[in-house]
């Protein structure tokens, strides 16, 4: 079972459904949401870490899954990941621990998929 | 009136009072809190930005004031600051706007103080 | 699989269990909770929308499911629903998006059930 | 002392400062925020009540002040106001009470100002 | 300046105003709120500590002030107070620290007032 | 299906994974988290109730499950449990109800397991 794949499929299906609703303001919000993480004065990895820590202290598993996937795509190291998680943990308290478990689970899944892919390519 | 100076004085006085209470676990938490922002795999500026965005989405003005001061000490540019604030705004919504006002007010105060200081030194 | 039916069954079973516990204050709270949405100066649809938006910014899926079902019973149109969701999205930020997905999924389920029912009645 | 006037002045000054920062995404967010409350399928009074209840359960005094002022401009009655506040109270709990106090204080101030104005016009 | 006295006066004035509004459900909620802390299977001190920790992790200064005053009336010791605060700190994270400062300030004020009163009685 | 057993297994597996990550600060936080609930001036049952109410108003199901299990191990009575839940309900509002359902479900499961165990021992 590939949790992040399943998550992405549901996410894309429901986003299409929402954007089909002809509410222009919601469409614009979704566009702004994407643009917020584009490289600017801050690089994409830093922005995704900001999104990840914000999602962790607000305790939103779906948002965490999304930003962990993006962080690994932008080349976050394990050390960087856990330092960011530690800030979320200190700021947000033990109440964030179940969400940190989820974040680490997704990180491991992403690392595993990359390995499998690299192995296949050889 | 120097808001960040007054804030720092109250903060230090009350922290001393709390640490005098002989609750060892609280003392240890305060030590961990400080250490979380030490340079590691991530540099101090990035960590302070993570703390700032976390504080903004959780809407804690005192925490915001603290991290804005620290961010300016670590050399954050205005462009970086507003990109970080934009992520907090997108993730946390319009409910964060009063806190972003506060953050910008503190930023301006820090920039102003630095100018005055530089001017005096000449 | 009928998610809102399953949800209602669990909800009713556990509410009965809680109310059987002989804690008079909890019982009174549950009664007040029901009464809050009764038609008064504001009509039932407006009140259910207030409950829906409050539940969305506080990000409680079960509460969202309940109020979406009630909103459709009170005749909310799709346009009204998405305008209410847009206010939740602007106030609460992108962190509400996973919950808006859930709300839209429940809305579609309610619309579908009504259609099936109307079809059968012919 | 006119609290809502002072609030509006600070709000406008800081919003100008933020919008002067040349962060296009923040500017767009502010525009979307305004547009969310425009009359559409739902009228302006209903939308302002949705914003008020969302702000109350999220416990943001500045947002509450803003929406109470707007609600009175759109002609909310006292009965409607307290029914909306009761939903915020039931959904969000006693933790919202200090914010409901603030909301009622602002309501009374708005009613008082209108009376004074009407009296002067005679 | 006596902060807890001033707080109590504002609190009582606004509560009277709210209860005068003839919204029966709000009145009943206020009654339930009072009753929740009455001695039952749990004694009043334990209940006030539960209210204090809940208020601290939800970060509501007015609620914290109220429950600290009540805790000292029920005879909480300093050691008990700081152990309860430590649980709030661990569960809720560093974001609660500004509120713990407030709680400790109120505790010291309550202790000081009692001393002054005892001294005068001699 | 034994929910609390399954929960404990996942919890322990992921905690081991997190602690294997060589982030010393996270390790220290986990140690502080455990120590916070050790008997001190307040007994273990009171501390677990504080943790339970904090987790309920912050609406974290995994934390609730953990503290309900611990509360039953420390001998909480049903009456005490529901009085604590009522405080969470009053402070946190109807938004906590889905989490109170979860807490009661876990309580019943713990009581049932104890009965089965006692029966087997005879």
Image: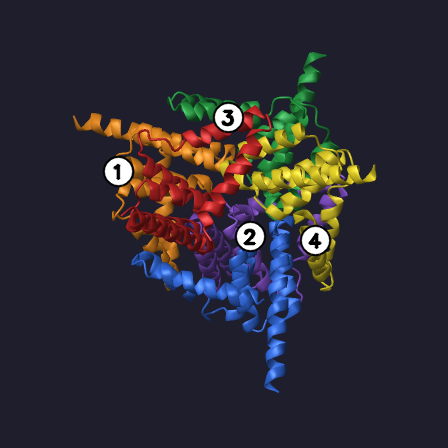
Chain colours: A blue, B purple, C red, D orange, E green, F yellow
Q: Is residue F117 above or below residue A86?
A: above
Asked if the residue under mark 1 is in contact with the one under mark 2, i.e. CB atoms within 8 Å, the reply is no
Both on one chain, marks 2 and 4? no
Both on one chain, marks 1 and 4? no
Calculate the distance from the C-alpha at mark 3 to the C-alpha at mark 2.
31 Å
Mark 3 chain: C
Graded by Cα atoms within 10 Å as few (under 14), some (14 to 19) or many (20 or more), the crowding at tag 4 reads: many
Graded by Cα atoms within 10 Å as few (under 14), some (14 to 19) or many (20 or more), the crowding at tag 3 reads: some
Mark 3 vs mark 2, foreground winner is 3
For the point 26% across and 38% down, the residue is D74
Mark 2 vs mark 1, foreground winner is 2
Asked if the residue under mark 1 is in contact with the one under mark 3, i.e. CB atoms within 8 Å, the reply is no
For the point 50% across and 60% down, the residue is B119
Q: Which residue in the structure is indicated by mark 4? A: B32
In this rendered view, identify the residue nearer to me: F21 or B77: F21
Calculate the distance from the C-alpha at mark 3 to the C-alpha at mark 4.
44 Å
Task: Find residue C77 and report its horizontal and vertical position in percent.
Answer: 29, 48
Q: Which residue in the structure is indicated by mark 1? A: D74
Mark 2 chain: A
For the point 55% across and 52% down, the residue is A59
For the point 69% across and 57% down, the residue is B35
In this rendered view, identify the residue nearer to me: B78 or F38: F38
Helix, strand or loop for disc 3: helix
Q: Which residue in the structure is indicated by mark 2? A: A59
Task: Find residue F29 and report its horizontal and vertical position in percent.
Answer: 71, 52
Mark 3 vs mark 4, foreground winner is 3
Calculate the distance from the C-alpha at mark 2 to the C-alpha at mark 1.
36 Å
Q: Which residue in the structure is indicated by mark 3? A: C28
């Amino acid at each position: 079972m590939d949790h992040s794949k399943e998550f992405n499929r549901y996410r894309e299906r429901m986003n299409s459904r929402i954007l089909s609703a002809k509410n222009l303001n919601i469409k614009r919000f979704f566009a702004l949401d994407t643009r917020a993480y584009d490289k600017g004065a801050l690089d994409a990895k830093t922005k995704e870490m900001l999104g990840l820590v914000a999602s962790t202290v607000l305790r939103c598993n779906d948002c965490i899954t999304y930003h962990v996937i993006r962080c690994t795509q932008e080349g976050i190291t394990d050390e960087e990941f856990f330092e960011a998680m530690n800030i979320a943990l200190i700021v947000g308290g033990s109440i964030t621990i179940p969400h940190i478990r989820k974040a680490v689970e997704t990180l491991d899944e992403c690392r595993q998929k990359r390995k499998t892919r690299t192995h296949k390519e050889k």
